[in-house]
Amino acid sequence: MQEVFAGPSFTIVYTPIRLVPHADSFQSLPSVVNPLADERSQDKKDDVKVGIRSTALLFGKNSHMILSGLAVSSASLISFAGHMNSQTLPFYCGVGIAAIQLARVIRRTDLDDRLSCWKGFVGCGWSGFWVFVGSLVDYIWSIL
């Protein structure tokens, strides 16, 4: 069902989107704080064979530095969102643990090894878990 809104100099077409989760939706959806979520580094050899211009190939040897920048920006923006939402100490502890987890994963991941990339991909999911736990504890703290 589409709705069309027309004004004097614009037209907006509104089409509602219905998201139907897959059975393995938690594995198929990337984590917000997961810089390895797209698995690009796992497929570098395949990208070259097929001729795909992926960011893993574009970043090359700078991948760790760029992923570190993405992790820092994620943690910073999540912290800023917490500040704007008046979160308290437990939230920031969760974000801090998540940032440490991301740094650990980025440091340990060998981007030329598929198994290491997969472990990094899974390990980044734990950073989202720690943000969630921090948010949950912060909420419980606020209602007590």
Image: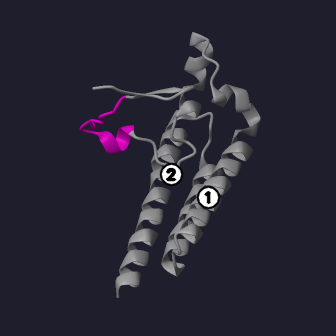
Magenta run includes residue 75: no
**Quadrant in which the C terminus appears:** bottom left
Instruction: Characterize the local packing of mark 1: few (<14), some (14-19) or many (20 or more) Cα atoms within 10 angstroms.
Output: few
Q: CA distance from mark 2 to mark 1?
A: 17 Å
Q: Earlier in the sequence, mark 2 or mark 1?
A: 1
Q: Secondary structure at mark 1?
A: helix
For image coordinates 58% across by 45% down, the residue present is 35
Mark 2 — residue?
124
For image coordinates 70% across by 50% down, the residue present is 69
The x, y position of residue 36, in whole percent, is 55, 42
Q: How many marks?
A: 2
What stretch of residues is rendered in magenta? 15-28
Residue 139 lies left or right of residue 93; in this view the side is: left
Q: Which tag is nearer the camera, tag 2 or tag 1?
A: 1
- In this view, the residue in front, 54 or 5, is 5
Q: State the image quarter where residue 117 is shown.
A: top right
> What number is the disc on residue 77?
1
